[in-house]
Image (cartoon, rainbow, N blue to C red):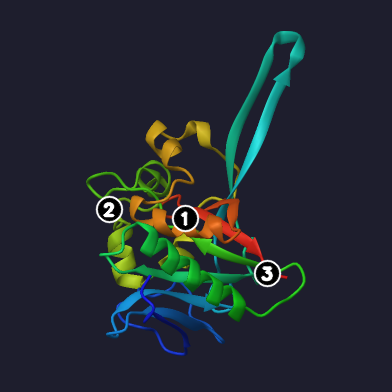
Amino acid sequence: MSSSLRIRLLDVRPVPAPLPQEDGQGARWVSAEAGDGRLLAALQIQPALGHSRPRYSFHLGRVVHAAPELGLHQVQTTLQLGHDATGEAEFSGLYLAPELTGGDDADALLDALLQQALAALPRRAGGLVMVELPGWHDDDGRSPFWDGLVRQFLPAGAPDAAQLMKRFGPGFASHLGAMLPRQLIHATFLPADAQAALGRCALAAEPWRRALQRAGFADWRHCRIDDGGPIWAKAVD
């Protein structure tokens, strides 16, 4: 990593970092810039979710069917829609320059960025900081999770996720959540490719996932409601 790297807190969104899902009161950005001013990486610090709009996620649980006398022991994944992240902090708007897709330089850069962001978080007992990672898409850019689950609860002819994102911005998931079922969903009833995509992050997000793991984050057993991407969390007290 270059010694001329600059990491700083900002009160405005750096360009071309993506828009976050939520941009409420107290939000700030952390950016990493090269010596020539090029933006290399960025993320937004959101101190409390769910105040400007509802934040939905699926909690990934388990149901066990067991009968030892019959030699039966079956574990199934379940999805339960909820607002479990309400009030927690979040890192969002994750940006990594396209030329930094991997390698030691990218790892060191993201590690430094996350440490600066963690240091800037307000401390409170029992608090968490969340990170939603984009879910897996196939070679055609389609989300098996969207096609296998979400689309079934939308009106016929409804736009796909990319069109909804363009219309409503990253916060479209708040509108989407109002259309999804509150009843427990058994993942075994989903198509096989949708089950395989559950909690799996996009290939382009792998550098972020590895950096989060090095920073002490772990899978929170929740996923995004649009593409099934994993949600990671870390205690901040």
Q: How far is mark 3 from mark 1, CA to CA?
A: 18 Å
- Which is more N-terminal, label 3 or label 2? 2
Of badges 1 and 2, the one in the foreground is 1
Disc 2 crowd, CA 10 A, few/some/many (<14, 14-19, 20+): few
Q: Position of residue 54 (x, y in %)?
A: 55, 69
Discs 2, 3 touching: Cβ within 8 Å: no
Looking at the picture, which amino acid does disc 3 mark?
Val
Residue at (74, 16) in percent of width and height: 67
Q: Quadrant of residue 97?
A: bottom left
Looking at the picture, which amino acid does disc 1 mark?
Arg
Q: Position of residue 7 (x, y in %)?
A: 44, 81
- Which is more N-terminal, label 1 or label 3? 1
Q: How far is mark 1 from mark 2, CA to CA?
A: 34 Å
Residue at (53, 50) in percent of width and height: 181
Q: Which residue is mark 1?
A: 209
The circle drawn on residue 236 is 3
Res 171 visible: no
Viewer-side residue, 104 vs 192? 104
Q: Position of residue 92 (x, y in %)?
A: 47, 70
In the image: residue 135, left or right of residue 129: left
In the image: residue 94, left or right of residue 138: right
Discs 3, 1 touching: Cβ within 8 Å: no
Eyeballing the image, is 116 above or below 104?
below
Say how many tags the image has. Answer: 3
Looking at the picture, which amino acid does disc 2 mark?
Gly
Disc 3 crowd, CA 10 A, few/some/many (<14, 14-19, 20+): some
Q: Which residue is mark 2?
A: 157
